[in-house]
Image (cartoon, rainbow, N blue to C red):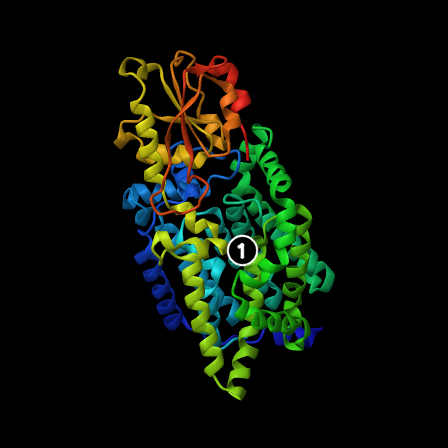
């Protein structure tokens, strides 16, 4: 055991700061150049609205991502390019952390650069790096935690628990999924060691740091009866079966099908290599986390950060293979991966050509057509007699539609929109004095919502102009004469979480 500890604590290779920094800068430049293409994602519109209603929590998420969205637009301006600055910076930082993980596993400068490049070119990281989402900052938080845990395991220095606790706390302020990573890592260390790190008094100190950082949001959730549990339950009920069916296929495509041999070899290396015996918990944590996510009906991308750690571990044997068998086919595989992943995850194609990429990544289509939705709503609003508009209300089915009208509506003469979806329900209802017409914006097949209103008729239809079959293509703008009950009594029935 002492020999293993001495081997693990040996001096690490030099960090390839310069090459990795250049690589991260190239990725950042590409993402910035593409940030203005298409438009906002529905979630980004929601984050902008949530940022305008600052709180320590929201029914479906902690406060960090809305806070960053508000900070970005305050500092850099009101545009997609400005909003996505934090996402670009987080992606660049994640690329750098990947290099740190490679170094921690004994990778030389070349291995560090290759690992950072492969991770940055992977599909799911590119997709979340392109736009603001909770998954964007989750990726960075998880990779930081993995790196710090590897450092803890390699050195045995319990003081690293403090840094781990800080990152876990920050991760909890962004998304509660980080708790699954913590469970998987702790259980893995307990199962295969080195268990001495669990006996360190610094572990409790790190846990205290994590709770202290996350405390404001945890308090908010407790004070509001833990609405996020309701949201999670609804997601599991609606999408759990599909998520379980697609989980294994998703693991094969989230980075790239051509990268699968690399991360498989990486898992085998972490499990078998005597020099990396101290890092074996990383090999155990990945399948354990998969089991947890499948059991909960979660989405396959939740485990991608650990998949990246396996990819990093596989880079050294992959490079050794290329030295023996030549570089031609590996280089071709990487170039094909970069091209395919860029087409699937980044806004490089004309919007009218998104049918194929959307088969793999529907989020591409969710960035198209929001101004057109606002145009359709404005057309519907114009049908309301001017004398009745002071008492009229614009109501939307979901937060994407409400966010779009928040962003684009004022320029079109529209009033503030209301919605019962997610935290928008907490920012309503309209006053009971608003007893005039109701302009309802809803998805094409969501006509059930009209039962809460009277004398409804369709007055406009959303057409994004590109033939993109996203959730709002063909959405209806419906004018109703009023509500079936006053807004204050109707509002609990209109609240929904999914």
Q: Determine whether 378 is above or below 389 in the image.
A: below
Asked which quadrant contains residue 402, the reply is top left
For the point 45% across and 49% down, which residue is it? Answer: 363
Please give the count of numbered marks on the rendered protein: 1
Q: Position of residue 368 (x, y in %)?
A: 37, 46
Residue placed most toward the observer, 435 or 156: 435
Which residue in the rendered view is the most extreme toward the bottom?
Answer: 324
Q: Left or right: 368 with respect to 161? A: left
Q: Position of residue 147 (x, y in %)?
A: 54, 62
Can the viewer see residue 202 in this picture?
A: no
Q: Quadrant of the N terminus?
A: bottom right
For the point 48% across and 61% down, which residue is it? Answer: 123
Q: Left or right: 224 with respect to 16? A: right
Q: Quadrant of the C terminus?
A: top right
Q: Determine whether 81 is above or below 10 in the image.
A: above
Q: Position of residue 7 (x, y in %)?
A: 62, 76
Q: Position of residue 140 (x, y in %)?
A: 48, 55
Asked which quadrant contains residue 434, the reply is top left
Q: Determine whether 299 is above or below 264 in the image.
A: above
- Mark 1 neighbour class, 10 Å CA radius: few under 14, some 14 to 19, many 20 or more: many
| Residue denoted by label 1 | 142
Q: Secondary structure at mark 1?
A: helix
Q: Left or right: 82 with respect to 66? A: left
Can the viewer see residue 56 in this picture?
A: yes
Q: Determine whether 62 is above or below 249 in the image.
A: above
């Amino acid at each position: 055991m002492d020999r293993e500890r001495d081997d693990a604590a040996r001096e690490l290779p030099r960090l390839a700061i310069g090459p990795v920094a250049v690589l991260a800068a190239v990725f950042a430049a590409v993402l910035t150049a593409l940030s203005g293409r298409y438009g906002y994602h529905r979630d980004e519109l929601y984050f902008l609205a949530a940022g305008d209603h600052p709180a320590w929590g929201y029914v479906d998420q902690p406060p960090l991502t809305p806070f960053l969205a508000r900070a970005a637009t305050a500092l850099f301006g009101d545009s997609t390019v400005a909003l996505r600055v934090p996402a670009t910076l987080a992606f660049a930082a994640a690329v750098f952390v990947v290099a740190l993980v490679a170094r921690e596993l004994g990778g030389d400068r070349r291995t560090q650069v290759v690992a950072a490049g492969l991770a940055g070119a992977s599909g799911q990281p590119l997709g979340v790096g392109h736009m603001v989402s909770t998954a964007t900052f989750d990726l960075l938080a998880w990779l930081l935690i993995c790196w710090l845990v590897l450092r803890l395991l390699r050195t045995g220095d319990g003081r690293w628990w403090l840094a781990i606790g800080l990152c876990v706390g920050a991760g909890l302020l962004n998304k509660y999924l980080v708790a699954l990573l913590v469970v998987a890592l702790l259980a893995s260390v307990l199962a295969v060691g080195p268990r001495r790190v669990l006996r360190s008094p610094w572990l409790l100190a790190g846990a205290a740091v994590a709770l202290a950082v996350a405390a404001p949001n945890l308090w908010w959730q407790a004070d509001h009866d833990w609405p996020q549990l309701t949201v999670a339950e609804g997601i599991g009920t609606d999408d759990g079966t599909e998520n379980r069916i697609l989980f294994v296929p998703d693991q094969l495509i989230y980075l790239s099908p051509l990268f699968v041999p690399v991360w498989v070899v990486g898992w085998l290396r972490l499990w078998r290599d005597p020099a990396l015996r101290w890092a074996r918990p990383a090999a155990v944590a990945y399948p354990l986390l998969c089991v947890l996510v499948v059991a909960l009906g979660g989405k396959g991308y939740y485990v991608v950060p650990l998949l990246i750690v396996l990819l990093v571990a596989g880079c050294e044997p992959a490079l050794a293979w290329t030295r023996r068998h030549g570089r031609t086919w590996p280089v071709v595989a990487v170039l094909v991966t970069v091209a395919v992943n860029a087409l699937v995850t980044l806004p490089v194609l004309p919007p009218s050509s998104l049918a194929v990429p959307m088969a793999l990544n529907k989020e591409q289509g969710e960035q198209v057509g929001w101004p057109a939705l606002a145009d359709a709503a404005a057309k519907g609003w114009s049908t309301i007699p001017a004398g009745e508009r002071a008492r009229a209300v614009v109501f939307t089915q979901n937060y994407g539609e409400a966010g779009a009208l928040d962003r684009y509506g004022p320029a079109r003469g529209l009033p503030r929109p209301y919605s019962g979806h997610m935290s928008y329900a907490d920012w309503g209802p309209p006053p009971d004095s608003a007893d005039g017409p109701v302009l309802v914006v809803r998805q094409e097949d969501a006509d059930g919502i009209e039962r809460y209103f009277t004398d409804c008729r369709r007055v406009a239809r959303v057409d994004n102009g590109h033939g993109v079959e996203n959730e709002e293509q063909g959405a209806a703008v419906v004018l109703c004469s009023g509500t079936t009950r006053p807004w204050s009594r109707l509002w609990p029935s209109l609240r929904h979480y999914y």
